[in-house]
Each structure stands twice: as C-alpha cells, then as structure tokens.
Image (spheres, coloured by chain):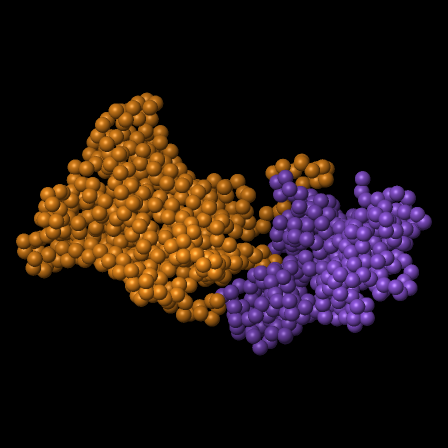
Chain colours: A orange, B purple
Amino acid sequence: MNRTTRPVLQALPIIRPKTSPDETLLRIIQGIGFVFLLLALAFPLTSLLLRAFEDQQGSFVGLRNFAIYVTTPSLVQSAWNSIWTAVITTCVVIPLAFAYAYGLTRSCMPGKWIFRAIMLLPILAPSLLPALSLIYLFGNQGMLRGLMGGGSIYGPWGIIGAQVFYCFPAAAIILSVALSTADGRLYEAAEALKASRFRIFMTVTLPGAMYGLVSASVVVFTLVVTDFGIPKVIGGQFNVLATDVYKQVVGRQDLNMGAVVGLVLLMPAILAFLLDRWAHGKRSATMSGRAVAYRPKPRRGRDIPALLICLLVACALLVIVAVSVWGSFIRFWPYNLSLTLDNYDFTRFDTAGWQSVWLSVKLSLITAFIGAALIFVIAYSLERGPARSLLAGPLRFLTTVPLAVPGLVLGLAYIIFFNHPANPLGIIYGTLAILVLNSIVHFYTVGHLTAVTAIRQLDPEFEAASASLHVPIWRTFGRVTLPICLPAIFEILVFLFVSAMTTVSAVIFLYGPDTKPASVAVVHMDEAGQASAAAAMACVILAISLTAKLSEIVAGRVFARFTSAWRR
Amino acid sequence: MAAPLRRQVCAALKLMGAALDDGLGADAGQYSGIGDPFLVIKDVGKQFGNFVALERVSLNIPAGELVSFLGPSGCGKTTLLRAIAGLDPPTVGRIIQAGRDITALPPAERDFGIVFQSYALFPNLSIAENVGYGLRGAAWPKARRQQRVAELLHLVGLSDQIAKYPAQLSGGQQQRVALARALAAEPGLLLLDEPLSALDAIVRLHLRQEIRSLQQRLGVTTILVTHDQEEALSVSDRIVVMSQGRIEQVGTPEEVYAQPASPFVAGFVGRSAHFTAKVHTPVGHIAFKDLVIPADAARNLLYGEEVEVFIRPEDVELQAMGQHFAGGFPSKVTGIEFLGPICRIALEAHGLRFEADVPPVRVTELKAIPGTQLLARFRPDRLLIFRTHG
C-alpha cells in the first residue's frame, strides 16, 4: 500500500488496527486452507513438473524427455487423435445441447422437468457406461453391428459417440443457464421495432448466449481430451493422450515420460481454462441488475419442433443407459438373452467383488463430508475474511487451479509426490486417505464456486452487524450463514459424492490392493473381457449416484418446507 | 470576504479549534460526560492504495446530538462512518469516544449500534431473535432478554410482529427492526448508514421523523450518513457537509442552508442558480455582462474581482412588465413547473438562467407564460457570493 502519494497523510503516524479474535480466526482458516492446497495440490504438481525434466535415475536432463516425446511418432499421433476427436465431439454436442437447452428455456413445451432430469443422467454414471453400451450395440457381438457397414466401433467413432453422451449434460447445463438469463426487455424492444423472429434470434438470442457457447465448447473439448475411461474401453488400437499417460505409467513404469505426457495433457486444459475465465468475465458484464427475466409465450411453430428435438435426444440418452442396464442382466450377450443376476455376483469376476462398491461408497461419503465442510469454511474465510491478508491472494488462486488439472495428471502428480521415499506424507500412499485427498482436490473448484456463489448472496453486512452486537463471528456463522447456505452445502456434498463415485481417471493410479474403487473395478473387468460384469458394476454405480441425487432433491424439498416462513 | 462567509468560517474554525483542544484533553481519560464532546475525531485520514478517501478530517460531536454526514457519493462520508465503527479503521488520526481512544480497536470492542442501508437482518431468525441477537451471556438471562426485546419492539411500534420473519415485513418495518436491534444493548453511539435510501418516498418521510423523535427521547448520540439533503436538513442538530474526502462545513441546518461556507455547499445544499460575475461600482454591486445587480455581500470586495454567485429560487422576486419595480430587470419566461404549493418559473436575462418560486396564484396575476417578459430582481441580502479561487 502506497501511503506517500499525497502529502496530507504523510506526516502522521499510521494506525495499526488491533486484530479482533474474529479476524484472527479467519486468518487461521485461510492459513489452514493454504497449507492444505499447498500440500495436496501445489507440491504434487511441482513434483510432476520437475519429474518431466529428469531421467529415471533422478538427474536433471533438461528438455531431453520432451525431445524424445516429439520425435516419437506414436506419441505425437495420440496428441493429434485427442485433438480431432475432441473437436468433432464438440461440434456434435454443442448444437444438440443448444437445441435442447433452447427447448427447456425458451419454449412452452410440456414436461420440461422430465427433460431436465433425463439431461442429468449421464453425470450420474461413470464415463465407461456409454462406451459399454455402444459395444453392446455395435461391438464385435453387437446387436446392430450390421449398421456399421463393415466399420468398427472400437476406435475414434466409438470414442466420439460415447463422449457425446458423456459431455452432453455439462454443455446443456451451461447453455440453459446462459439462455435463461436473458433480459426480457430486449425481446420486447426488438418486437416493438418489428424485427423478424430470425433477426431477433441472430441479434438478441445468439449474442446473449455467445459466452455460454464459448464456455460450453471449452468445457466439452477439455472433458474429451482429459477423459480416460471411454478411450480405454472403446478406443481399441486408437491411442489418445489420456491412454498414453496410463500406458507410460502402468505399462512401462516410466514416470518421467508419463510426466511429459501429463504436461502435454495439461496444456489444452489450461488453455481451455483461461479461455473460459475470459468468457466468464465478459458474460457477467453483459447482464444488468435491472434486467427482467424473459418469459416465453406459447407458439406452436417453435414449441412442437423443440419438443421433438428434446424427445429425440432424451430417448437417445435413455436408450444408452437402458442398454447397459439390460445388458447387465443378460446371461450371454447376444446369444442367450435370458435374464440373470449372475453378472452382479462380482466375486466371480474380480477378487474384490462387492467390496469395491462398499469401498467406493465409503470413499465418496468421506470425500463428500470432509470435502464439503473444508470447501465451505475455506470459501467463507476468503469471502468474509481479511481480503488483503498475505495468504488470501495465493489461496484464491489455488482454489481455481484444480479445474484446469485433469484427473489423470493429478493422480500421476500424487504418485510422484507421495510415493517419493523422502516424503513423510508417503504413509498415506496406497490407503483410502490418498483417494479421499485426491478426490477432494480434484473436484475442489466446482464446490468452491458453488460455496462462493451462495455466500455472496448473503448481505455483506452480516458480519459487521454481528460484530457491532459483540457476537463472535463463529456464532453468526453457525446461527445464520450455515442455515441459509444449507442447500448449497448439500449441493456440494452430493456433487462430491457423485463425482467420487463415478471418477476413474483421478484414482486409477492411486488405489491399493485393499482400496480398489468400483469405477476402477469396471475398467479391470472390461480389460479382462467381462463386459457384462463391467456393465453391471457401472449400473450399481449409477444406481448409487441416482439415490444420492434423489436424496438431494428430497432434502431440498424438506428444507424448503421448513424454511418457507423466512424464504422470500 | 463576504459577511456570511466570514461569519461561517469563523464559526467553523472555532469549532475545529475546540475539537483540537478537547481531543487532547479527552485523551487523558478526563471525560466527564458534561460539556465535553462525546466523540472526538482528530486528523482522521483514510487511504486505499493511491486513493485518499478521507483527508485529515477533524470533528467534534457533543453527547445527545444527531449529526448528519451529508455529501455526494464518494465524498468520504461512509468511509468516515466505517472508521468510527471500526469496520474499516482509518489510516491516520485519532478517534476518541467517551474519553477512550478507540482508533485501533476492532468493532466488537467498541460501543455502538449500527443500521445499514440493506438492513442486514438475519433472514432465518425471527424478529424477536434478531432484536435479541446481541443480548447474550450472563448479563442477559432469558427473562430479562425477552423483556428487553418486547420493550424495544414496543418502542418501534412492532410489538405485534414479534414472531414473524424479516421477509414477512415491509421495508420500513424491517428498518425499524434493524433500529431496535442496534439499540438493544443501549449503545452510547448510534450509527445510521443511509438507513432510508432503500425505502419508498412516503415511508422515508415518515420513518425519518420517527427516527428523530426516538433519538431525542433516548438522547443517544447519533450519526446519520445520507446523500439526501432534505433528510439531513429536516432531522439534524448539525450537518457535516463533505466533499472529496474533506469537510466543507459544519453547522446547523439553518446555517448550512442560509450561510454556506463554500461554493460547493451553496451548490449542493438547496437549489440555486449559479453564475460567475465581477465586482462592480457602486460599492455593493456585481455585474454579469452588462447586467448590474446589487449584492450586499460584495461590499467588502475589490472592484473587478471575479466572484461565484448563487441565488436560490425563493430569493428571486418577480413583477409584471410596466409596473414600478426598483432594480428589476426584464427577463424572459422559458418554462413553468407546477410543484403543488408553489410554481417554479424558469427565466433568462442577458444569457443568465435562473429560477423563481412563486405561489400558483401569483403566476396568474403575473400572466406568466413561456415566451413572455417579466421584471425580476434578486434580493441583495440573499445573494451568496464567493471569491473565485486563484
């Protein structure tokens, strides 16, 4: 702070405000958050970075690993494969998701809530599930194999097909938010000026949703490039960046080359992240506080096509899920279609059996509860604590980093950091603790943003009012902030639970012999040729996630009922 | 220097001098409660990075007074209030409340109640819980707390709303709850940060009188931050007019209105026409172009000196053309605005635009319609004159 620019204040002694216990408390929490993200995020990523410049013996070799990388045709080929499949997926998903979101927000079609619910279905399943379904339909024993016209589903087209399913909800959510925040007055003004519908769409709707479109494209692109499950299951001989990392680390035990590929994988993710931040900044500037929400009026010319498109997409999503569910109950696909529960007797296929499922539930519950508490309290200390403290800036930056770090890269960074012989924290390696830590950090940013949004909706003077009444901040936090933010906290909780349930990429490097999560078991059973058991396990994961999501809805209803007196 | 101006500056200087003396005296913990100012603000400055929000402000507030901080947004009034509350401590200076140096203390160690523009009521707590929020600990057993809450809600006229939640009340009612909450623990100082800005015009008028009478009944020293001059004029014992981080004038509402200490105050408080003129002959006259106007305040100024002149609409007198009207000059009516009890006539003479307030019946008498000519004159004793700086 520069206090010497104006002479008026120069001559006088500077006041050193006495720190209140409230402020000390928030500073300590900021400190804890900083140390946590330093140990669980910054240090592992730094070790990964350093590892890329070393050889197997640990001596510094400069850019040699990178030189090997760019001169190995197969590795460069995978990078290119990642990019073009991601581009095509984006080009397919965005128009579909836009049409779907348009129908949800800008039409008067019936059954919107059902379409909203179906839209979320892919989030609740591991990404392997659509890949398994496509194999059921179009694979070597696929029922509709004839439709492939001699082509193979194992490769880029299978990847793209499964990715479209897997990325659809993310794009549709972003676009429906972008389309629902339209200013109704702009439409009234355009109509008053006698603009045609097409012209209104081109001059009002599209520009309004432009940043949403950029954001959605970026998110889909990143999801495809960094996803591991789908190319692993359906990619066949078609290599992408994500499978390369896995092969280097698990197949060749070459952590150095793994680190190099990891850094390459990090690059599109970081670019996408920066682009998205840019778009986000632009978007918030376009919506004024006095905007009036747009309310569509019924019009058949728009509502019927919207309904048809949404029906088509929703059916496709349901069919993909249904095929896996059905397949998991089939005795011997496609030759003996009689129903059986045998595929759910996991001990027949994998020694861990149902233990994987219970482990996943345990992992997800611990991640959800510890993660939600940690994320919310740290977000609160950042939002309402001393903004110009030494740690606030770096901590705020660290909370945004996980969004740009693909799960595989984080997992790899964890092996390198926590498995280092000199690291005393290495004791958690191979235990449930490292899986929990990894899951919390991997999904940190989304939870943090949810918490920040909720906290920012509170009156900024709550803390000042409570201090003037001589009430300590933790008391106001417990009596006011927490109860009001309960729905947001529950949202974070369920988000963490579902994410930890379904993720493969973050934990594939980190599980130990006694800590194999269900999502990894799906990969292993599929590798072992037990597609039906893999589908069954994926369906179990889906069912558990679905239960969590439904409980969120029920809890939300109950909460709304008990608090309707004080809610506006 | 013009007479009103000189008088005002002297008064202000005396006030500030008093602030300095009392400030030092009070520092030693000599606060006796009678005669000494309750709150002493001495050389308080606040800087945000390179931006100086407050420049060495000194001020003295006697016990039991209602003092308004008045100024446009960004003038530093809220910064000063937040410094007094300890929410944003000042960069330099001293603040002494009841003989205790509170400059560096956090809000929780000070003795004040505060009401915010946004009310800042806790939405998930009932009205009773909100009001009793600060009444905790051994000093406030349940029965006593309930009694105090009931008493306060009776005081603000909301006894029947005790079990409701803030969202179920109107804006004005919510602000009364906030007032009751701020007063609950009987603070020595009540801070009101634009408490009425979020309310409807009618509720605002009503509530400001309620706040004033409550304040007078309780005798609590009160600071009201506002950008609404009418509000400040109507309820304050004294007004502190602020601009660009500085105090422009401290005075009673009458003083601030009738004897503004600076062109800024003259322009900001009340409505006035503003023009630049030169001191002219004979003594006590000024000239705008070739229009020579008698002005008492110009008596002691040198011929040819440039001055800033303000004239309020109620200080302009009108007469129909052709009538005898000493000192009247022909002016063209450019517009008439009907305001209920009065009409405001916009006029122009020699390129000088000004307004005159007259009763509606007078408009008919004068046959004032846009385009016609009237005779106008400014009351010589009411022209506000300031020497142009530089």
- On the image, the x and y values in percent for residue A522 come to 19, 48
In the image, A90 versus A298, the foreground residue is A298
Q: Check the image and report above or below for B176 versus A136.
A: below
Q: Please indicate whether residue A387 sits to the left or right of residue A89 in the image.
A: right
Residue that lies at the very extreme toward the left in this rendered image: A335
Q: Quadrant of residue B373?
A: bottom right
- Quick check: B169 above or below A319? below
Residue name at image x 64 percent, y 67 percent? B201
Please report the residue visible at 46 percent of the width from the left and 46 percent of the height from the top.
A282
Residue A560: x %, y % from top left:
41, 67
Name the quarter where the C terminus of chain B is drawn: top right
**Nearest the eye: B293 or A332:** B293
Residue A539 visible somewhere in the drawing: no
Q: Position of residue A457 (x, y in %)?
A: 49, 57
Q: Residue A79 at what x, y percent from top left?
A: 27, 34
Q: Which residue is the extreme one toward the right?
A: B282
The answer to which image quadrant residue A52 occupies is top left
Residue shown at the point (38%, 46%) measured from the top left: A215
